[in-house]
Image (spheres, rainbow, N blue to C red):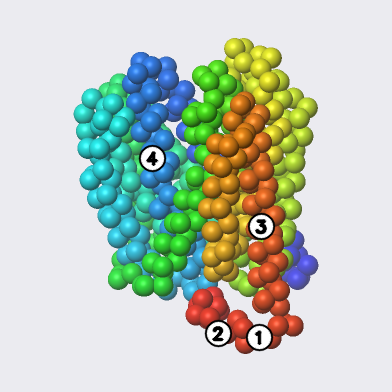
Amino acid sequence: MTPEGAVVDHRATGRVDGLLVTAGLFAANVASYAFTAVAARALTPAVFGELSALLALLVVGIVPAVSLQTAVALRIARAGSRETPALLGLGLSVAVGWTALGVLVAPALVPLLHLDGVAPALWLAASLAPLTVLGLFHGLLQGRRRFRALAALVCLEGTGKIGGGAAGLLLGGSSEAALAGTASGSAAVALVGWLVCGRPRPARPQRHSAAEALHAAQAVLALVLLVNLDLVLARHHLTGPQAGQHAVGSVVTKIAYWLPQAVGVLALPRLADPAARRGVLPLALAVCAALDAAVVLGAALFGPAAVVLIGGGAYAGTPVPVWCFALTGSFLALVQLLLFAALAGADRGATAAVWLAVGLEIVLVAGWLHDSPAAVVAAACVATGLLVLAGVALEHRARQRSSPANGPKQEDTTADTAISRAP
């Protein structure tokens, strides 16, 4: 095959990988929404509220899984598969510790969430172990650029976790049964992930990998808070109907945020390579911005129709600034890419910037912008927009420091750069 033909084939493979990862993520999200719809119809309002609160905690509970995926993907992309045993040991250690913490906290959730017993909280804790290990397997596949296997595992995770939860829900008709099904389904998928990754055996975790995972956990936690913060603030400051309007608009935020997720999945392993990063990041940001520009434009043109489609006829004619919600989600998608790039370059300034954006949004809403859904989402839009600018500035500074004009010795004096150059 000629070099030109090889290039064409590589590009075609990249497009197929992107489509498959997008399809896998889409299928997982659709399964999640379908589970919510089934639960809303199968449970009484009180039990559905209980399950929704527990599932919201599960979103926070998967922060270590997402952190492991990011840290492991970067480590594998830098150093190769020889570190797989140590990384598996790290993942198992995190899973056991996180699950133990969940068991210890479970009794405190009973009065906090007005549960009838501790069993639902214990099943929630039991779900943490397989989901955390699955994050590690995702990272192994992502770092090896086995995107088709990753897409299949993501899709299977949605089927196993949500399918198990739905089966438990239909058989038991309670939040306890639903979470028991979620834990069982996730455990089965984790076993499949271990098989797909080559049945690796764990080894003693390495200190530098644990440090990277801990820093990634801080960054991911800050991002998760930022993505969901406006909903919490709206619930606190707005009246019931206004909070409902904001919740409808936030669905558009999540659509804009999740639409370009495959871009980050495909780009992350290449961001670990300093030479490739200079070209990959601008291209990834451009693709992400182009996808979300369509969402913002559609929200601006068809905002009222989108509100009715999402919330139903009860929300017809409500003043929800859908375009602003879409713009906020677009900014969050760009923030995620910039944060990935910062983690790949061992730049801790970006994580601090995300925490500062969380604080800024809280101050804006608590102090001034809390009279309407438009005001709350405006605060979120300002905070995330400024964060995008800060992320671009930090990336520009990192590039200036690593440019040949500043001399090669600057790069060679850090352990992180030495690791990143390992074969």
For the residues bearing labels 4 and 1, Cβ distance under 8 angstroms: no
Q: Secondary structure at mark 2?
A: loop
Residue 3 in which image quadrant: bottom right
Above or below, 319 against 251 in this view is above
Q: CA distance from mark 2 to mark 3?
A: 26 Å
Secondary structure of residue under mark 3: helix
Name the side, left or right, on which 14 lies relative to 105.
right
- Marks 2 and 4, how far apart at CA: 41 Å
* Residue found at x 26% / y 43%: 105
- Residue to which mark 1 is pinned: 408
Which of the two discs, 3 and 1, labels the residue nearer the N terminus?
Answer: 3
Choose between 419 and 374: the one closer to the eye.
374
Name the residue that disc number 2 marks.
413
User: Which of the two discs, 2 and 4, labels the residue nearer the N terminus?
Assistant: 4
Residue named by callout 3: 390
Q: Is residue 416 above or below residue 35?
A: below
Q: Quadrant of the N terminus?
A: bottom right
Which of discs 2 and 3 lies nearer the camera? The answer is: 3
Q: Considering depth in this image, is 190 or 239 the residue closer to the camera?
A: 239
Q: Residues within 10 Å of mark 4 (few under 14, many from 20)?
A: some
Looking at numbered disc 4 in the image, what kind of residue is underneath it? Leu
The residue sitting at 72% across, 25% down in the picture is 303
Q: Are the residues flagged by discs 3 and 4 in contact, CB closer than 8 Å?
A: no
The residue pinned by badge 4 equals: 58
